[in-house]
Amino acid sequence: MKNILLLIFVFIILGANAAYAQSDFDFNKVKKDGDLFEERSIDLDRDGTPEKVALIAYGIKSDSEEIISYCGQLVVMKNNGGKTETIWSGPKYKEEEIFNKNEFRFVFAGFGLEPIEALGDIFGDSSAVLLSPRAQSDVRPSTYRVYAWKNGAFSFVRSQALLRDEKDGDKFNWKDAPEGEIEKRAWIGKFNKINAPGESEAEIWAYEKGKVMIGKAVLKATPDGFGVTKWIEPLKAVE
Amino acid sequence: MLRSRICLFLIALSIIIFPLGYLSAQNSVEDLSRNINADGISTSPGSGARSSTTPNGGGAAGNAASEQQNSGAMGNAASGVSIKNVLDTARLYVNNRNFHTPASWRITQQGNVACAYFVSYVLKKAGVISEIEYYAPTLVKKLLATGKFEKVRVPPFKSGDIITWWGEGHIGFVAEDGRSIDNSSSAGCPKTRSIETLGPADRYALRPKYQ
């Protein structure tokens, strides 16, 4: 009994460590073409064994000092009797195409980063969805690319921002990112975690009177985007 | 007995790892907080710089040192702004994150989305503008409203031009050698590089009226 309690305690502590160990994207993890990064585990085909969703580095560019940019090819791998097999892979783009906003481009460059931000049943419709922000290099509403896992492959669904206009209350709906004017708007800036099917925790960002505001909220998926069910931290100016 | 010892070992290990993991996540911001002086400028050399060398070989420490050397140039800002002054100020922060405050560090997601912040920080420090801006299109609008810039068609680029890429999605300076000085998302700090590295620049730039 005592040992069981001790083991439970150990798992709680290790679990807490895992939560804290989650960090933002690490650009320096990639050293050469072919390196695997942004690895996530999820049971896509619901056979009880998780698949690995990851990016494989290609198109690395360096200057005399360091790596300055690279791309990632989205892949899904499965462990088959101790052997890892790639069961699906997305397209790779040529060097001259990395400036185009291709659907499956995952670029990590001076003008922005496109990591895997969330993966799971984000919309609560029992399907696995991957969210990745479009590269940006200033503070503006994030444009999210949405990919759904269907029939053994990821397919591109949309590329839009999750915006709340003044009239929207606590609803963040899929809309094209505004050009030129972002005052009086709030947006979902980062998905921190998926709590349950259709329920996520995210950072909410806004820009008001030249001040950047950040808050945290629990979100529930709606047909048009997400609605806030609870504010964990209300929007407040970062100063 | 053995299981108990293993459990105790794992508990001890977890207690050690937990604060280490937490501290490492907090480390960069705490470093910044510690090193910010009353002016909002870090005075400690080298904190957070990913690359050890600057294009002129000075390194992050060199940047901090040259910040002190450049105090004369900063002083000039009060009497008159010059392109040299602005570019000298921008160069101080190449390969360097010491221009961040804890707030800007948070807002720019550890320097990843800091292009407008960097440009406005440099221009504020050089005495061109009075406010920090995080969003490139608003910064462009505000710079034009100062009357200190004119919108010109580029190329050719000129030293001191403020250029944008991707329809004002990214912003930076043009240096004397024709390269850009702008914040890099991948490096998390400003870099000098060829303008084309980031793709084609926008057709219009802001050309300073000051010389």
Image: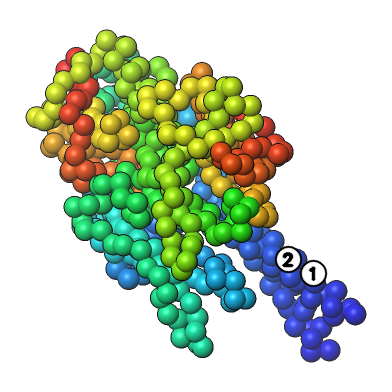
Q: Check disc 2 and give the amino acid type.
A: Ile
Residue B18, image x and y in percent? 67, 62
Q: Relative to the observer, which residue lies in front, A157 or A110?
A: A157
Quadrant showing the C terminus of chain A: top right
Which numbered circle lies on residue A44? none
Residue B145, image x and y in percent? 32, 12
Alpha-carbon span between mark 1 and mark 2: 6 Å
Q: Residue furthest front?
A: A151
Left or right of A22 in this view: A66: left
Give the class, few, some or many, for how many residues have Cα within 10 Å of label 2's Cα (few <14, many ≥20).
some
Left or right of A234 in this view: B162: left
Can residue A124 be seen here? The reply is yes
Residue depicted at x 42% and y 44%: A159
Q: Check disc 1 and give the amino acid type.
A: Phe
Contact (Cβ within 8 Å) of mark 1 with mark 2? yes
Q: Which residue is mark 2?
A: A13
Q: Which residue is mark 1?
A: A9
Residue depicted at x 75% and y 71%: A10
Q: Which quadrant would residue A44 be assigned to in this image?
A: bottom right
Give the class, few, some or many, for how many residues have Cα within 10 Å of label 1's Cα (few <14, many ≥20).
some
